[in-house]
Amino acid sequence: MRPAHLCLAVLVAAVWGVNFTVIEIGLDHFPPLLFSALRFLVAALPAVFFVGRPKVAWKWVVGVGLVLGVVKFGLLFIGMDAGMPAGLSSLVVQIQAVFTALFAYVALGERPTRIRLLGMAIALCGVGVAAVDEGTSGPLLAFLLVVAAAACWGVSNVLTRKASPPDSLNFMVWVSTVPVLPLLGLSLLMEGPSRDLAALRALDWQGVGVIVYVAWVTTVFGFGAWGWLLRRHPASTVAPFSLLVPVFGMSSAALFLGESVSPLRWCAAALLVGGVALASLVRTGGPARPAPEPHTAEVTRLPLSSARRSL
């Protein structure tokens, strides 16, 4: 990989990691479901005029949009709003790689190797350590919501593998159009019109900057650049850079939000990142039944494939 391409891969990981800190700041301005809806609204509507028509069947666009956009990001934003720290969230969602491997075995017949199973076990131990740390210092329910978000990310990864989109940016832009109305409806129902209107009336430049970052920098630039790298380099070369996401996530949360990192959290980080590396970077065994070969959807094998989408 050329130095310029290497720097771009690190930049994307940094953008996705800092995104968790930006989300935390944004939750001071907006209710979580409204914030998530605005993120997709701003990301999708201008971009659809530049990316052309969807290049996969609508069933895949709608399916991934609902699972990833509505459920995954809805749970993540609610969990963080309920007290899950930004840095810890950036770490825990990496367990999506384990969920992806499990769901791929069920849906695609991809048998994990022994090394991958070992990596999944290590990553799960990391989540257990993180749960103990959060259980003694913060709301456990918020932690579980973020874990559930990671599981939904795993489902969306498998759906994306099945869709095999030839253009990751085109796919992500159209996927981003799906959650807007469902999230707005859920926000009106659960958060209330008065709270939503109050947030919009109080919109300031910081709130605008937060929405622009999570919509255009994280989603459009992040996934566009990631897809560009995947078209020029093997997925096994590009994917490991996503393991830097929690490094930037925890570092930015400590720097800008003053979040402390306990010894237990460092231990959880080492276990989870190391386990995800084993589970994600080692090739699977032969499929139990024929499965379609993934193309640019390889980005979903590691986070901020969110899967994308970190967010």
Image (tube, rainbow, N blue to C red):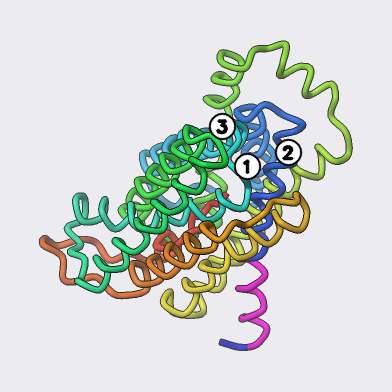
Type of amino acid under label 1: Ala
Q: Of label 3 and label 2, which has the lower sequence position?
A: 2
Q: Choose top left, top right, bottom left or bottom right for residue 251.
A: bottom right
Q: Which residue is mark 2?
A: 26
Residue at image coords 49%, 72%? 230
Q: Choose top left, top right, bottom left or bottom right for residue 281.
A: bottom left
In this rendering, would 135 be left or right of 245?
left
Residue at image coords 72%, 16%? 195
Q: Is residue 9 magenta?
A: yes
Q: Choose top left, top right, bottom left or bottom right for residue 1.
A: bottom right
Q: Nearer the viewer, mark 1 or mark 3?
A: 3
Q: Secondary structure at mark 1?
A: helix
Q: Which residue is mark 1?
A: 44
Measured in 3D between alpha carbons, the distance from the residue under mark 3 to the one under mark 2, in whole angstroms, is 12 Å
Measured in 3D between alpha carbons, the distance from the residue under mark 2 to the one under mark 1, in whole angstroms, is 19 Å
Q: Which residues are magenta?
A: 3-13
Secondary structure mostly seen in magenta is helix
In the drawing, what numbered circle is on residue 78?
3
Q: Position of residue 160 (x, y in %)?
A: 38, 52
Type of amino acid under label 3: Ile
Q: Position of residue 306 (x, y in %)?
A: 49, 52
Which is more toward the observer, 256 or 49?
A: 256
Q: Position of residue 204 (x, y in %)?
A: 88, 33
Q: Position of residue 263 (x, y in %)?
A: 56, 61
Q: Of label 1 and label 3, which has the lower sequence position?
A: 1
Measured in 3D between alpha carbons, the distance from the residue under mark 1 to the one under mark 3, in whole angstroms, is 22 Å
Mark 1 burial class by Cα count in 10 Å: few <14, some 14-19, many 20+: many
Mark 2 burial class by Cα count in 10 Å: few <14, some 14-19, many 20+: many
